[in-house]
Amino acid sequence: MYNCGPTVYDWQHIGNLYSYIVADVVRRTFEYFGFEVKQVMNITDVGHTVDDVDEAEDKMEIAAKRERKDPLDLAATYTKQFIVDRHKLNILDPEVMPKATDHIPQMIELIQRLLEKGNAYVAADGVYFDITTFPGYGTRLNAEPPDERKAGARVEVNANKRHPFDFALWRAAKPNDLQQWDSPWGRGNPGWHIECSAMSMKYLGETFDIHSGGEDHLFPHHECEIAQSEAATGKPFAKCWTHVRFLKVDGGAMHKSIGNVILLSDLESWGFEPLAFRMLVLNNKYRQPIDFTREALKGAQSRLDRWRGIIRDAWQSTGGTPIDVAPEDPRRTTFVAALTDDLNTPAALAQAEAVLDLATTGDVATQRHALEVLFDMDQVLALSLRERASDADLSAEERAALAERDEARKKGDYKRSDELRVELERRYGIRVKDTKDGTRWERVRRKGA
């Protein structure tokens, strides 16, 4: 599977990250079903123009000049933070994460193939793909033709083009361009669309199974990828396309111009966990827009906290002894059915909720079984349910403090035991409960809060 990666000219906001959570669920689902998945996600560090208009300036150029940095240094900074954010959301690393600037030769080679086959032409300001040579251009993923959709209004008038919708494969260098390379057509830089075709085919072959991205990629980016790839190879490009709908904020669009762009670090500063955002995303069908509000995120955090509390109590009362989950287990079968229903993650969460009920009401054997079913489901949900259930969530210092309190109770030193109880909550945010079945603990304040 190939995921359209970020253009690393700025921080990735939660709308961007939403798309990568969905792609992660797709990957995890197929691996859960027993498939071997090779995931490739590119890093766009050149070529992406503003509003996808060929005549516009490259986003990397604008950001580098704004911040007075070398474009590659800038890209490295934003790529690093993007990876950090992915890890906080339990998004798996792709097997290959190629950078556009490392694949200029592959792009040039692909452009040459298109020129030789008559699908492209050299103009005064670069090389363009001739859309009239590819029947059905713009309608493989979109029902209406390009000139009837709103995006068509952004197509600039360019006397060098044979047709207004012809798109740039290679752009001739401008005097102030910070990123430019030699090519058979002079110094310049690649168009945005050519990079994904070149990199996906290098690592996955000329035809592969799944291509994903946001709905903003539908046109022109993905239609251009299809046209140039299939024109060059004569083969189908991607067998299946997955497009995630937009994330809205309080019912409206998220834009820098109105000051409502939200980063993952913003959620953390408000006191929420990144995995609460993942829970919020899982409770939404990817084909439907998701409306982000603080109230919705608060509900997702509460749901996650409740799950963890139930799982932790069941883990501690059963001794945490693991058992295997049979593939034909009816609860697992229902969970699988939800995933195979066009990745119906809200229904999958509902099945997990049903198993949670067993973890609270059943006997020890039933609770233990419920836990393992939940941990099995978490291979897809990726909410760190097992890690938070056991003392794996504890630091060595926290674990030592709990052990010291247990030892004080065993010795009858209740004064010291009470002091340590207060210290555990004050310093670490860990509340200790003494029950007839032994000592239980819960984290009442998140780490770093």
Image (cartoon, rainbow, N blue to C red):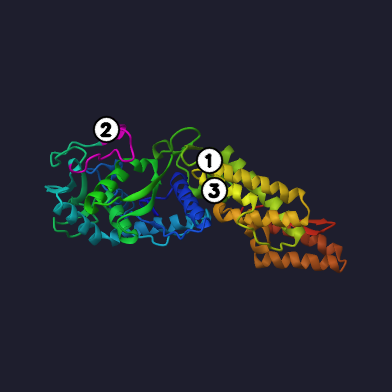
Q: Residue furthest front?
A: 328
Figure check: 102 above or below 268: below
Report x, y in % for residue 367: 73, 54
For marks 2 and 1, give the CA distance.
Answer: 31 Å
**Quadrant assignment, res 396:** bottom right
Residue where numbered disc 3 is placed: 278
**For the N terminus, which image quadrant?**
bottom left
- Which mark identifies residue 153? 2
- Crowding around mark 3 (Cα neighbors within 10 Å: few <14, some 14 to 19, many 20+) is many
Report x, y in % for residue 211: 38, 50
- Crowding around mark 2 (Cα neighbors within 10 Å: few <14, some 14 to 19, many 20+) is few
Whichever of labels 1 and 3 marks the residue nearer the N terminus, that label is: 3
Residues shaded magenta: 133-154
Whichever of labels 2 and 3 marks the residue nearer the N terminus, that label is: 2
Residue where numbered disc 1 is placed: 284
Q: Secondary structure at mark 1?
A: loop
Task: Give the residue type that dot 1 points to.
Answer: Asn
Q: Is residue 67 left or right of residue 264?
A: left
Label 1 or label 3, whichever lies nearer to me, is: 1
Number of marks in the image?
3
Q: Residue at x 18, y 36 (%)?
A: 157
The reply to whether residue 231 is in sight is yes
Report x, y in % for residue 56: 24, 43
Task: Give the residue type that dot 2 points to.
Answer: Ala
Q: Is residue 153 magenta?
A: yes
